[in-house]
Image (cartoon, rainbow, N blue to C red):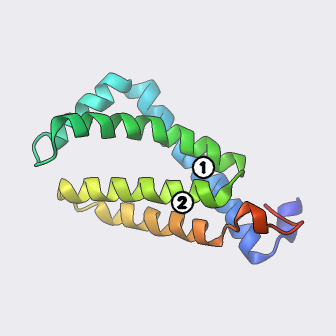
């Protein structure tokens, strides 16, 4: 396998791209397949309607979540425009972190770990224009 010959940075990014991409794809598709979009949006809005967050914003963010997860997963797995995709994913993870904070959920720490991981991947991913011939 060629990946065993990658330098440390490239090996890390390749592994995270594969594992995080598959995990995010699973998380996104289970919402579509097992819950269904209507049930998921209803669940999110029910939880957030109890807070200061306006109902319309809650509905929009629920749809953003259910669409963004599989789309970002597919983009991560593709490996194209890695810096942009990882940056968008880190912004998405920040959105999820803020949501857990608004709900005052103690499991917000897990979201912070994902945020740090995706931001690290964004930082380690060279912009397309500066890629060397070895690229990712």
Q: Exactly how many numbered labels are in the figure?
A: 2
How packed mark 2 is, by other alpha carbons closer than 10 Å (few <14, some 14-19, many 20 or more), is some
x 87%, y 70%: residue: 5
Q: Quadrant of the C terminus?
A: bottom right
Which disc, if any, is residue 21? 1
Q: Position of residue 128 (x, y in %)?
A: 74, 61
Q: Secondary structure at mark 2?
A: helix
Task: Specify the quadrant of the image occupied by residue 15.
Answer: bottom right
Residue at 59 percent across and 53 percent down: it is 85
Above or below 113: residue 27: above
Quadrant of residue 13 in the image?
A: bottom right
Question: Which residue matches tag 2?
Answer: 87
Q: Residue furthest front?
A: 129
Nearer the observer, 59 or 28 = 59
- Classify 34 as above or below 75: above
Q: Residue drawn at (44%, 57%), measured in percent from left and top?
A: 91
Residue 107 against residue 78 in the figure, above or below? below
Q: Residues within 10 Å of mark 1 (few under 14, many from 20)?
A: many
Task: Determine the image quadrant of residue 112.
Answer: bottom left
**Which tag is nearer the camera, tag 1 or tag 2?**
2
Residue 44 image position (x, y, % from top left)? 25, 37
Name the residue nearer the viewer: 119 or 54.
Answer: 54
- The numbered mark at residue 95 is none
Q: Position of residue 65 (x, y in %)?
A: 39, 41
**Which residue occupies 24% across, 29% down?**
42
């Amino acid at each position: 396998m060629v990946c065993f010959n990658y330098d440390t940075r490239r090996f890390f990014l390749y592994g995270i791209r594969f594992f995080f991409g598959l995990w995010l794809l699973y998380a996104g598709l289970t919402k579509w397949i097992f819950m269904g979009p209507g049930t998921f949006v209803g669940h999110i809005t029910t939880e957030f309607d109890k807070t200061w967050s306006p109902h319309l914003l809650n509905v929009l963010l629920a749809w953003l979540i259910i669409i963004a997860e599989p789309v970002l997963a597919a983009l991560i797995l593709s490996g194209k425009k890695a810096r942009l995709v990882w940056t968008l994913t880190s912004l998405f993870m920040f959105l999820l972190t803020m949501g857990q904070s608004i709900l005052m959920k103690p499991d917000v720490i897990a979201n912070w770990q994902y945020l740090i991981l995706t931001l690290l991947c964004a930082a380690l991913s060279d912009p397309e224009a500066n890629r060397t011939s070895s690229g990712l």
